[in-house]
Amino acid sequence: MAGIKDKVAVIGMGCTKFGERWDCGLEDLLTEAITECCQDAAIDFQDIDAFWFGTFTNSTFGGLPFSQIMKPHYKPVTRIENLCATGSDTFRNACYAVASGAYDVVMAVGAEKLKDSGSSGLELLQPHSDRTTPEPTAPARFALLAPAYAEKYQVEMDYLKKIMAKIAWKNYKNGSLNPKAQFRFQVPIDVILQSPMVAWPLGIHDCSGVSDGAACAIICRAEDVHKYACKNPMYVKGLSIAAGFGWGEKHQGYDYTTAWESVYAAQAAYKEAGITNPREQISFAEVHDCFTITELVIYEDLGLSPRGGGVKDVEEGFFELEGKLPVNPDGGLKSFGHPIGATGLRMLYECYQQFKGEAGERQIERPRLALTHNLGGQPSSCVVSVCLVGSEKD
C-alpha cells in the first residue's frame, strides 16, 4: 500500500459555533463555515475544483443539498455518509482525490441540522422487516462497556464511575475555553456523579449532546502549497477507515472491552504514518467521546494507554490539557455535541488551530503530530476513521 503520507495538505479550514442553532438553516451553517474557510485560505469559492459533502440525516438525495445551497456552478459534488464517521470519511475521500491528481484543490465539508429533526437524539437505522433486530439505544449499547471493563480489569464500579466522571470533567473544562463549543462551562465531578441516569452506569453527563454545526477544509497537493497564501499548512500523515462485519454481536468471545475497528484502523494509520509508539510520538488527540466509557476504551484501542492502564492514566491526569498527551483539547463531543456530518471535520479543525498556534487558552506547546478518531455505530460493530496530521513535512 503506497499510502498518502505528506502527499496532500490542508491550506484552509472553517468551523461554525456548535449548538442549538434554531436561528440557522443548513444553508446558514454551510455559509458560516465555508466563508471562514475560504477567507482563511484566501481562495475564491468558485476556484475550488470539486466538493465532498458529508451529511447523515438530510433527506434530500445526493450532492444536491450542497449544490443548490452553495451554487458551485456545475462543479462535481459527492455526498458521503458513513454513520457517525461521516465527517472524517468525507475528508479522507477528498484527500485521495487530490493525491490521485484528479483535482488541484478541493473542499471537504460536513454539516448537520439535528435540532430541527423532530427527535431528541440521533436518527436511527430502520429495523429489519421481521422485527428481529434488537433496538437498544446508543447509551444502552455503550453502557455495556463499563461493567465488562470493570470485570476484566478488576476495577470497582464505584471507582470506574469516578474515572468516567473525571473524563467528562476534563472535556467540559477544555470546552469552557472554546468559543465555538456548545457547552462553555465547567461541571464539578460530584455533580457529574449525581446526574440523572440514562443507561446504567451512564448518567446525563457521561453522554454527548445533540447539536447543529458545520466544518470544512480546503485541500491541495503538498508540493503546491507555495501557490497559495497559507502560512501554516497541515500535512496529512495517514488515513484509515475500518468497517466492522458484526463479529462482536455474533461471537461469544467478544467481551465488550474494545472496538476492534478502532484497533485495526489505528494500526493501519500508524503504519502509513510511520508511528511505532503512539503514546510518545503523538502530541495530542481528538477522539470520539460519545460516552465517557467510550473515551476510556479508545485510549487503549489506540495504544495511548496499555490495556487496563487507561484508568491509571486518567487518575494521574495524563490526558488533561496540561498532561503529557492531551485528549480532546477542544472539549470533544462532550462540549460540542455531535452533528454527525460535521464532527470528524471539527476534530481536524482543532488540529489545524493548534498547529497554527491559534487555540487560545487551550493552546498546546509546540504540537507536531495529532490524531483524530471518529466512530460510528455500536461497540461490537462499527465504522472507525483514524486520521494522522502534522505541522511539518518529514
Image (spheres, rainbow, N blue to C red):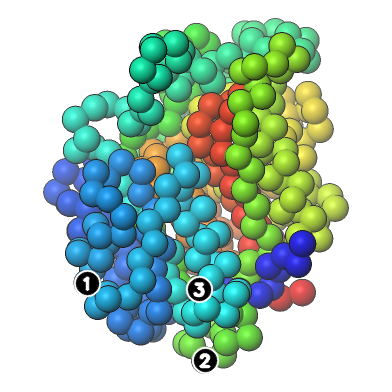
Query: 76 or 389, which is in the foreground?
Result: 76
Residue at 70%, 32% in the rendered image: 260
- Secondary-structure class at tag 1: loop
Find out whether the residues at labels 3 and 1 contact each other: C-beta distance under 8 Å: no
Of tags 1 and 2, which is closer to the observer? Answer: 1
The correct choice, above or below, for 29 with respect to 135 in the image is below
Report which residue position mark 1 lands on: 71
Of tags 3 and 1, which is closer to the observer? Answer: 1
Q: Horizontally, is 42 left or right of 67 in the view?
A: right
Q: Which one is earlier in the sequence, the residue at label 1 or at label 2?
A: 1
Report which residue position mark 2 lands on: 227
**What amino acid is at disc 2?**
Lys
- Secondary-structure class at tag 2: helix
**What amino acid is at disc 1?**
Lys
Q: Which one is earlier in the sequence, the residue at label 3 or at label 1?
A: 1
Query: 255 or 293, which is in the foreground?
Result: 255
**Quadrant of the rendering where the N terminus is positioned:** bottom right
The span from disc 2 to disc 3 (Cα, nearest Å) is 12 Å
The correct choice, above or below, for 51 with respect to 373 in the image is below
Q: In the drawing, what numbered circle is on residue 274?
A: none
- Looking at this rendering, what residue extends furthest in the front direction? 130
Report which residue position mark 3 lands on: 219
Find out whether the residues at labels 2 and 3 contact each other: C-beta distance under 8 Å: no
Q: Horizontally, is 313 left or right of 389 in the view?
A: right
Mark 3 Cα-neighbour bin, 10 Å: few <14, some 14–19, many ≥20 = many
Q: Position of residue 130 (x, y in %)?
A: 39, 12
Q: Position of residue 305 (x, y in %)?
A: 77, 35
Q: Position of residue 211 (x, y in %)?
A: 31, 40
**What amino acid is at disc 3?**
Ile
